[in-house]
Image (cartoon, grey):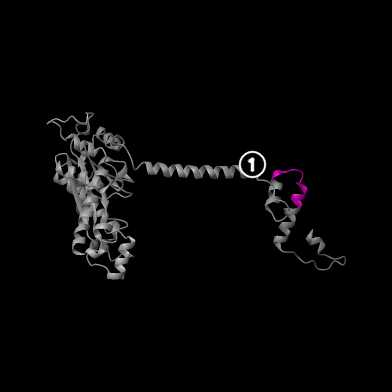
Amino acid sequence: LTYLLSTNQKKAQPIMPPFGTILSSIALLVITITSSGNHVASAFVNSSSFATKRTPPSIHQHLHIMMGKRQQQQRQNKGNKRNNKKKQSLETLLELESDLHDRGFKYVIGSDDSGGAGCIAGPVVVASCCVMQPYSSLFGNKPSDESTESDILPQSAIDALSKVNDCKILTPTQRQEIYDIIKQYPNVFAITTAERSAPQIDELNLLRATQLAFAESIETLVEQHELPYEECYAIVDGKISPKLYADQREEESDMLNHQAFAKRFSVRPYVNGDANVFVVALASIVARVTHNAKMKEFHESHPDYNFDENNGYGSKSHIDVLHRLGSLEGIHRMSFKQVAGR
């Protein structure tokens, strides 16, 4: 239409309109032809610059709004479920290990770290824990006031262990009580710890240093207690599992000797394992108490930094002290952004 109007009666050279104008004209013609009630055309007019009135939302728009609200509610419910996982019952925490025991894995090893992400000072500490006795002999259904000499653990210790969960939701007093029980009964709980210092973290990076500590802790526990590899199963808190016996594998792989791989046993990562697996929760408590004890030692020699309160984490007060007094070589992680240049 625009093309025709742009020509004169003397057949002068027409002025070609822009391509967008041609498309707009065609769209206007289509809308005019189909304006007898076609929903598609009505929706097009409502969304285009040709519309003069704002029509009510269509059924599709209404459904889209409703589905958006539903998805928002689902996300909220999912978040609530995540929070509720932090308070699992003892029976729930033992489900995975009981299943592994039924499959022939007698020794389930749990590992967790403390002083990792968020810390700007001190070592990263990894702890591994394995319950060496059958759970049925530890957690019976006896009344709390009944305890005999044949029991592996006294009822008071069993009551305390029934509160085991992710160390982050336990009070310092509860963590210390459970830690003392674990240390008091080495015939029941096999534990090992490994750490990487701040200079080692700077040299390797935090992820690499932590994975090496995980591997060292698990390997040491297995070797110290001479556990049969085919009956071992390790669970590591987080998204990544360490490569066990890495050095020995490389050496014997170069020698084309594959017998070293007999030392390999299953190790898997488990996100939020400290809140869902009993031995990982125990390991998280051991790692946290051990790490905090290290930071208290630093506090005794450097009280101005309040390591007994911040435990090496980058709190506001800790950063303020860094600005005033500077960093401590050998204690602060110099490669970290909050510390670099101070």
Specify the quadrant that holds the N terminus.
Answer: bottom right
Specify the quadrant that holds the C terminus.
Answer: bottom left
Residue furthest out toward the right: 9
Residue 19 as seen in the image, left or right of residue 293: right
Provide residue 28's location: percent of width, then percent of height: 75, 53
Instruction: In this rendered view, identify the residue nearer to me: 309 or 93.
Output: 309
Q: Residues within 10 Å of mark 1 (few under 14, many from 20)?
A: few
Residue located 78% across and 61% down the image:
2
Residue 119 as seen in the image, left or right of residue 301: right
- Quarter-of-image position of residue 275: top left
Instruction: In this rendered view, identify the residue nearer to me: 84 or 309.
Output: 309
Provide residue 161's location: percent of width, then percent of height: 23, 39
SS for callout 1: helix
Residue located 49% across and 43% down the image:
73
Instruction: In this rendered view, identify the residue nearer to me: 48 or 212.
Output: 48
Whether residue 197 is visible, yes or no, is yes
Residue located 21% across and 44% down the image:
177
Mark count? 1
Whether residue 256 is visible, yes or no, is no
Residue 1 as seen in the image, left or right of residue 314: right
Provide residue 238's location: percent of width, then percent of height: 32, 49
Q: Is residue 78 above or below residue 293?
A: above
Q: Is residue 204 above or below residue 45?
A: below
Instruction: In this rendered view, identify the residue nearer to me: 243 or 167.
Output: 167
- Quarter-of-image position of residue 65: top right
Q: Disc 1 residue type? A: Ile
Residue interval drawn in magenta = 29-39
Residue furthest out toward the left: 149
Q: Is residue 326 magenta?
A: no
Q: Residue tagged by mark 1?
A: 59
Provide residue 221's location: percent of width, then percent of height: 18, 46
Q: Is residue 35 magenta?
A: yes
